[in-house]
Amino acid sequence: MGSWGRLLLASVVVLAGCTATGAPATETTPAPATPATRAASAPTGCAARVEEGRLPDWADAGFSGDARAPHVFGAKGEIVAVLFGQPLTVGRTEGPTNKILWVSRPAATPSPDPSASTTLVITATLDGTTTRVTREVAGGPGPSIVDVPRAGCWHLELRWSGRTDTMDLVYVAA
């Protein structure tokens, strides 16, 4: 199986009725960057790829049968974001929230740092800008509501329990 196939196996557990909360956000919007600063500080391009297929076996606990839900894999396959209310939307006044269930792949070895916080820390940067927000999911990967201030492609750096991964998520305007 190729590396992409293994990535696909790194999906999430979707718990149909889960509720989500997140810690208050921290938002930083510095003065506009010069072209040289922008190139050095913000990634460009968007690698967001929403999968609609079956969730991998390690991520489908709580489901019966052929578990399918929109989801995005982390670049290293360490975590998957199951998306509820797809597409993710900025300024939504009705309908579903930007609920995301985060499921991490079971660790192959014990955490490199057992004293590391289990909190999932999400640092999101809007593509092509220096706009950055931080979200936290207490207790580690699990249900959350992840809202961002502007539509576009957001590059996420994810840290939990001594582990890391990255992914891109696209948010559209309401």
Image (spheres, rainbow, N blue to C red):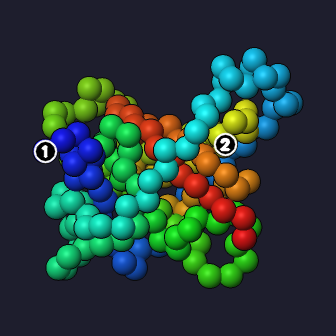
- Of residue 74 and residue 102, the one placed in the foreground of this image is 74
Q: At 52% across and 70% down in the image, what residue appears?
A: 86
* Tags 2 and 1 touching, CB below 8 Å: no
Q: Give the number of the disc on residue 126.
A: 2
Left or right of 61 on screen, residue 84: right
Mark 1 surroundings within 10 Å by alpha-carbon count, few (fewer than 14), some (14 through 19), many (20 or more): few
Q: Position of residue 79 (x, y in %)?
A: 34, 47
Residue position marked by numbered label 1 in the rendering: 1
Q: Residue at x 19, y 33 (%)?
A: 110
Q: Position of residue 116 (x, y in %)?
A: 37, 32
Above or below for 1 versus 64: above
| Neighbourhood count class around disc 2 (C-alpha, 10 Å): few under 14, some 14–19, many 20 upward | many
- In the picture, residue 87 is in which quadrant? bottom right
Dividing the picture into quadrants, the one containing residue 63 is bottom left
Q: Position of residue 68 (x, y in %)?
A: 30, 72
Q: Comparing marks 2 and 1, which lies closer to the viewer?
A: 1
Q: Say if residue 136 shows up in the picture.
A: no
In percent of width and height, residue 27 lies at 72, 43
Say what amino acid the circle numbered 1 marks: Met
Looking at the image, residue 2 sits to the left or right of residue 20; the answer is: left
Give the mark nearest the N terminus, 2 or 1. 1
Q: Is residue 134 left or right of residue 107?
A: right
From this viewpoint, is residue 165 visible?
yes
User: Which residue is farthest right?
Assistant: 31
